Amino acid sequence: MIPFLDLKSINAKYRAELVDACARVIDSGWYIGGSELAQFEQAFAQYCGTKHAIGVANGLDALILVFRAWKALGKLKEGDEIIVPANTYIASILAITENRLVPVLVEPDEQTYNVSPSLIEKAITPKTRAILPVHLYGQLADMPAIMAIAKRHNLLVLEDSAQAHGASINGKKSGNWGDASGFSFYPGKNLGALGDAGAITTNDDELAKTLRALGNYGSHEKYKNLYQGVNSRLDEIQAAMLSVKLKHLDTEMAQRRTVADAYTRGINNPLIALPTQALQNSVNDTESHVWHLYVIRCEHRAELQKHMLNNGVQTLIHYPIPPHKQQAYKSLSSLALPASELMHEQVLSLPIGPTITAEQVERVIAACNSFQKC
Ligand SMILES: *Cc1c(COP(=O)(O)O)cnc(C)c1O
């Protein structure tokens, strides 16, 4: 069986380095808020090209804390509207409602699966205060267009970069386009820890300072609490693991791109629609996508998934139910979002981890091409 994602083999490649880093932390006697975190934050900020990176406990917290900080700084208030793609992972929406802000769901572009700038513009009302673009499946949203809209309407932009570490347009990476960005280092993400972890990047000094306090009980200074904060910290062991993994991220990214290219060239079944990469008007077109997921579409998805399994290929669905059709969001269930709903019925993700072999890739392609309608 070709597994969807083989985390064991991915981390096995770096075993010696990871064990060394782990031993270093154990022997240091310092487990929270020490030099491993400071070093990783600096390296990750440098990687993204931002002034600050702030480690937090996970990707959801990263997004929640940015909205919370903007509320603390008087830039947002309860009831403000936040524009977000309808077909995102539910975490993006949770970060909005957790802060008692109002999600305004916008349909995706059917080619790139990413939020469509023209529909963002149509969704703006006098209550709109921010846009939360999601770089879904690893492809940067159309950030030049989105930033232009935000500027015109005086809106804040929080990028959800959980799936797009290192993706760039014209050399500018995810995490460095918006006013702030949330990253997840969940083990299965392109930059994955060996447990939960996340980070926020920003170029805004005041925001960075507020975020550091909010994630540490609302305290800038020990035993002085400016805000009713939370405990959301990236611990030393995970920071040490991430420093090891960050060094290999670009190599893994290149491996993912090679696999994506092979799928795009090799799969030619008319029943299967392939993902498209938006043309970004630059020589660096390929860099806007880091292929966290390779998502195909098929009208007969259930049969296709079964066929793949019969051919020894594990596939997954990202995602089977749109957020507005979840039990948790009954209040949104009457929204008409046909493009998003259709996508949720048709999408299927093929294996694309950095350790998949060329022979396995050929087997995935052959399995796709031998699929027929029953
Ligand atoms: C994974 C993910 C998150 C949440 O990250 P966690 O670290 O699991 O909390 C948020 N948004 C998107 C788009 C994600 O894929």
Image (cartoon, rainbow, N blue to C red):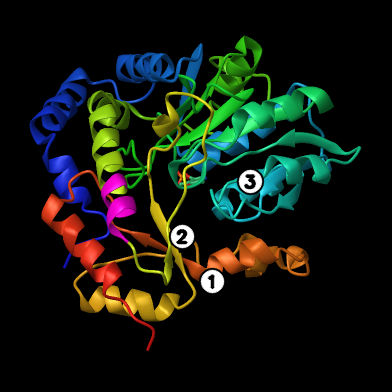
- The magenta region covers 261-267
Using the image, tell me which numbered label, if any, was put on residue 318.
2
> Residue 183 at x, y = what percent?
47, 34
In the picture provided, is 194 more to the left or to the right than 331?
A: left
- Amino acid beneath label 1: Glu
Residue drawn 33% across the image and 14% down it: 39
Q: Which residue is mark 3?
A: 115
Q: For the residue labelled by badge 1, is the local secondary structure a helix, a strand or a loop? A: helix
- Marks 1, 2: nearer the viewer: 1
Magenta residue check for 155: no
In the picture provided, is 236 more to the left or to the right than 161?
A: left
Q: Which residue is mark 1?
A: 345
- Amino acid beneath label 3: Val
Measure how far apart labels 3 and 1 are at the Cα level.
18 Å
Residue drawn 32% across the image and 79% down it: 306
Q: For the residue labelled by badge 3, is the local secondary structure a helix, a strand or a loop? A: loop
